[in-house]
Image (cartoon, helix red, strand yellow):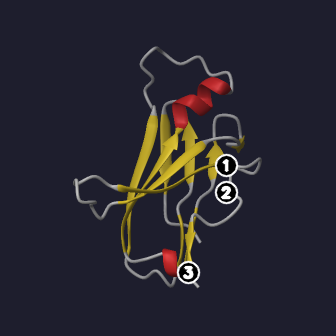
Amino acid sequence: MGRLTTHVLDTARGQPAAGLAIDLYRMNKSADGAPVKVLSTTTNDDGRCDAPLLEGKDFVRGQYRLVFGVAEYLKRNGDSLPEVPFLDDVLIDFGVDNPTQHFHVPLLLSAYGYSTYRGS
């Protein structure tokens, strides 16, 4: 059964990013042309979500967007950010062609950079 998962690691601290807010959107447009918000969640102490973001019949082919609340997480954890932070929300747009597969979208972050990839 296919599913969508994520994992957030704070590379500056060398630990999982616990308590980081995540929003998931389907990019197939609603009647007003906006992306459709699927869910909001927060990472656990391991930097993961307690359940897959999507799975089974809810996980369909299409374009998606993950929005990670990076600046709020960094401020809450003691980072001294400028008034206008370099990274505020990190958006990752990605496509799912075969929803029977596992799509894992990790985020490695610091106050001034991030990376992602399709994991397993």
Q: Are marks 2 and 1 in contact (CB under 8 Å)?
A: yes
Q: CA distance from mark 2 to mark 3?
A: 17 Å
Q: Is residue 48 above or below residue 58?
A: above
Q: Secondary structure at mark 2?
A: loop
Where disc 3 sits, the SS reads: helix
Label 3 vs 1, first from the N-terminus: 1
Of badges 2 and 3, nearer the viewer stands 3
Label number found at residue 43: 1
Q: Position of residue 20 (x, y in %)?
A: 62, 41
Label 1 Cα neighbours within 10 Å, binned few <14 / some 14-19 / many ≥20? some
> Residue at coordinates 71% horizontally, 40% vertically from top-left?
14
Question: What is the CA distance from the residue labelled 2 to the residue labelled 1?
Answer: 5 Å
Amino acid type indicated by mark 3: Gly
Q: Does residue 110 sit above or below 83 in this rendering? A: below
**Residue placed most toward the observer, 7 or 110:** 7
2 or 3: tag closer to the N-terminus: 2
- What residue would you read off at disc 2? 49
In the picture, the disc for residue 90 is none
